[in-house]
Image (cartoon, rainbow, N blue to C red):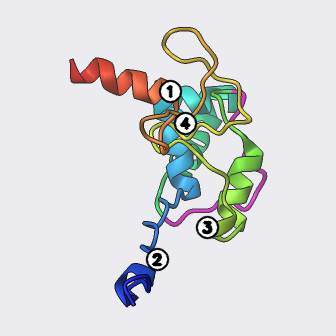
Amino acid sequence: MRDVPSLLSMLATPEPPKPVMMPWDYVRLRRKSARLSIAEVARPYWHRPEHQADVERNVAGLEHPGVRGQWNVNLSRAMPFSADVYRQLADLPPEQHPRLCTGCGWDEFTSQYDTNGDDVTWSRENEALCTRCEQIAAREAR
């Protein structure tokens, strides 16, 4: 009977749930990763000074928890941003969300460079981060 595993060893250790990225988190992370203010992100989208406040309010609203833009949200004129990723986060259940860096919102289909000038990939040390965020964290830890 020693070859029979115990009941406890037969129970699989459940994997911890993967972090869920919401659309408002994605917008905030992409903006902060680009080191832009809300006004800087909004600037390419208004052409008359009287529209500035409205556009800035709309961009800021996209970062408020619970807000899912119902229109075609595309901020790619101002910063690295994928409208397709945003729609997936806004419309699909969490188990169908794409894999995104929890530090900057990068996805593997978006071209981005790390701090060494190389293409970003997934970190080998922390699967939730991209190599750019890993390098930035290592610099800040020094």
| Circle 2/circle 3 CB separation < 8 Å | no
Q: CA distance from mark 2 to mark 3?
A: 23 Å
Query: In percent of the image, x 30 and y 17: which residue is there?
Result: 139
Query: In percent of the image, x 61 and y 67: which residue is there?
Result: 94
Residue range of the region highlighted in magenta in the rendering: 66-77
Majority SS type along the magenta span = loop
Q: Which residue is mark 3?
A: 94
Amino acid under disc 3: Pro
| Front position among marks 2 and 3 | 2
Amino acid under disc 4: Arg
> Which of the two labelled residues, at mark 4 and mark 3, occupies the earlier sequence position?
4
**Magenta-span inclusion, residue 75:** yes
Query: In percent of the image, x 49 and y 24: which residue is there?
Result: 132
Mark 4: few/some/many CA within 10 Å (<14, 14-19, 20+): many
**Magenta-span inclusion, residue 135:** no
Residue closest to the eye, 13 or 76: 13
Mark 2: few/some/many CA within 10 Å (<14, 14-19, 20+): few
Label ID, residue 131? 1
> Which of the two labelled residues, at mark 2 and mark 3, occupies the earlier sequence position?
2
